Amino acid sequence: MQTTLGRGVERELNAADYTVGWICAVTTEYVAAQAFLDEKHGRLEFTSCNDNNDYTLGKVGNHNVVIAVLPQGEYGISSATSVAKDMLHSFTNVRIGLMVGIGGGAPSQKQDIRLGDVVVSTPSDGNGGVLQYDFGETTQGQSSHTTSHLDQPPAFLRTAVNGLRSDYEVDGHQLEQAINTVFDEKPRLRKKYKRPDASTDKLYRTGVAHTANSEESCDEYCGRDDSSLVPRLERDDYEDNPAIHYGLIASANSLMKDALIRDKLSAEKGILCFEMEAAGLMNNFPCLVIRGICDYSDSHQNKV
């Protein structure tokens, strides 16, 4: 099958040309990923037998990228494993793996994590970058957990992270400028995908829980004064906003909504973020896990 690239250049699509495999869990992430492609290619006419994935093909810089999304309504470790295995059957030359999407932050005195920030999985204290944990009950104050260690990303990806990290330390990351450029080119995405106002970013104290059966908003049910919220200063002009954090990401099939367990794992293991897919990838599809923070892994879900 031929595809038309920029300026009318045509070439034959070949699965062997794609070396970056990018996996998203939900449609929102899939749309955002496609918006940042420098080129968008067509679709392959044939994929491996029994490959159930939907793919978007394109280019970022000099890299040919294949992006896949988990099936509608399916989340978690086993679904991510299936998508990754199918991708590798059809795209045998993929050597750079990325799992990119949203996750719940674990802010602490050491890590000023805020909504919209980015967490990148990197090895820490003998851990490979992703830590698997499993829950019994998930109600605040009644949870237990176990953890296990997973393979770390390939050395060349870890080296690339250090290179980018040093560049950002000097010059900043310019993520906001890149996002605004996409909005200028694709204005219909702005309403749904733009970053909400900073006033919507509220971090509740650990002991303040929002019961699942309450229909009241957090402002009404949990309060919005100093007794309920953790006070935080605005970031100044010399701080990156959004900020990028590097360290451990915790992964499980259950959604983390318990601030007590969040803080316990953060203190004991140095966890920065919680998500639901990466543990299904690391041993079979060694990849870098990148998560944008959409809530604080507690009972206060921020739908904005």
Image: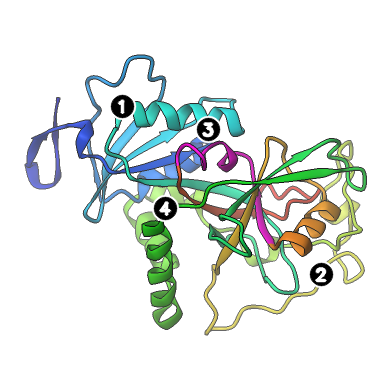
Query: For the point 82% across and 61% down, which residue is it?
Result: 204
Which residues are drawn in magenta?
A: 271-285
Residue 230, disc: 2
Within 10 angstroms of label 4, few (less than 14), some, or many (20 or more) residues?
Answer: some
Question: Mark 3 sits on what residue?
Answer: 80
Three-letter amino acid code of the residue under disc 4: Pro
Pointers 2 and 1 in contact (CB under 8 A)?
Answer: no
Q: Quadrant of residue 132?
A: top right
* Up/down of 208 relative to 148, above or below: below
Whether residue 256 appears in magenta in the rendering, the answer is: no
Disc 2 versus disc 3: distance between alpha carbons? 35 Å
Nearest to the eye among marks 2 and 1: give it: 1
Amino acid identity at mark 1 = Ser
Labels 3 and 1: the sequence-earlier one? 3
> Foreground: 189 or 45?
45
Q: Earlier in the sequence, mark 2 or mark 4?
A: 4
Q: Is residue 304 left or right of residue 266?
A: left
Q: Which numbered disc, 2 or 1, marks the residue that appears first in the sequence? A: 1
Q: Position of residue 57 (x, y in %)?
A: 28, 37
Q: Helix or strand or loop: what does disc 2 sit on?
A: loop
Select label 1 or label 4 by which is in front.
4
Give the residue drawn at x 56%, y 36%.
280
Q: Nearer the viewer, mark 2 or mark 3?
A: 3
Observer-side mark, 2 or 4, equals 4
Q: In the image, is residue 282 above or below residue 71? A: below
Marks 3 and 4, the one that precedes in the sequence: 3
Q: Which residue is mark 1?
A: 90
